[in-house]
Amino acid sequence: MTEMIALLALVQEHAPAAAEHAEAPNVFALTANVSFWTVIIFLILLFVLAKFAFPPILGYAAAREKRIQDALDESARQREETRQLLELQRAELAKARAEAQAIIAESRQAAERVRHDLLNRARAEHEEMLVRARADIEAERARAIETMRREAVELALAAAERLVEKRLDTEADRKLVSDFLSRAEVAEPVGAGR
C-alpha cells in the first residue's frame, strides 16, 4: 500500500512540469513512457491483488465449493438412507401382510374347528334327546298298556259280574282276568298293531 502512495506522489511531482512543456495530451497516443508506466502499475496492482485480494476471494470460493460439495454429499447420503428406509418399510409391510394372512388362515381353521365341535355336540345332544324321548315314549307306552290292561280287567270283571249275576271275590277275579290277558298278549303282542 505504501508503494502505491509513493507511486502517486511521484506521478504528481512530474505532472505539473510535464503539463507546462506538453501540448494537449492525447489519450490514444502510444508512447514508450506511458506504456512503461502502465505495465509497471499493472504489475504492482497484480502483485497487490495477488497478495491481499486473491487469497480471501479464492478462500471464499473454495469454502463455497466445499459447502456445495458437502450439501451434495449430504443429499446423496440422505437419498441412500431414504432408499434403505423405504426398502425396510416395504419388507416390514410384506412381513405384516404375511402375518395377517397367517392369522386369517389360523382364524378360519379355528372357526372351522369350533363349527365342527358345535355340530358334533349338537348331534350328540340330538342323539341323547332321541334316546331319552324313545325311553320316555317306551315308558309312556308301557304305562298306557298297563292302564289299558287294568281298564280291560275292570271292564271284563264288570261284564262277567253282570253275566253271572253274582258277586265273586274281586281280587281273585282280577287275578284270573290278568292271567288270561297275559296269555292273550303272548299269543298276539300289543305292539304288533303299530
Image: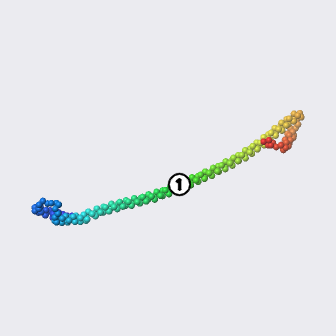
Instruction: Return the residue at label 1.
Output: 97
The N terminus sits in image quarter: bottom left
Residue, x 55% and y 54% (percent of image)? 101
Q: Amino acid at mark 1?
A: Arg
Q: Residues within 10 Å of mark 1 (few under 14, many from 20)?
A: few
Considering only vertical position in the picture, is 68 above or below 117?
A: below
Residue 50 in picture, x, y percent from top left? 25, 65
Residue 64 in picture, x, y percent from top left? 33, 60
Residue 166 in picture, x, y percent from top left? 89, 34
Q: Residue furthest front?
A: 29
Residue, x 33% and y 61% (percent of image)? 65
The C terminus sits in image quarter: top right
Find residue 148 and report its image quarter: top right
Q: Is residue 61 left or right of residue 121?
A: left
Residue 6 shows up from this direction? no
Q: Residue furthest left?
A: 20
Q: Nearer the viewer, residue 1 or 93?
A: 93
Q: Nearer the viewer, residue 189 or 153?
A: 189
Considering only vertical position in the picture, is 184 above or below 64?
A: above
Find residue 153 and report its image quarter: top right
Q: Is residue 169 left or right of residue 10?
A: right
Q: Nearer the viewer, residue 168 or 162?
A: 162
Residue, x 82% and y 38% (percent of image)? 152
Residue 64 shows up from this direction? yes
Query: What colour scheme does the image use?
Result: rainbow
Q: How many marks are shown on the rendered structure?
A: 1
Residue 37 in picture, x, y percent from top left? 18, 65
**Secondary structure under the numbered disc 1 in the rendered image:** helix
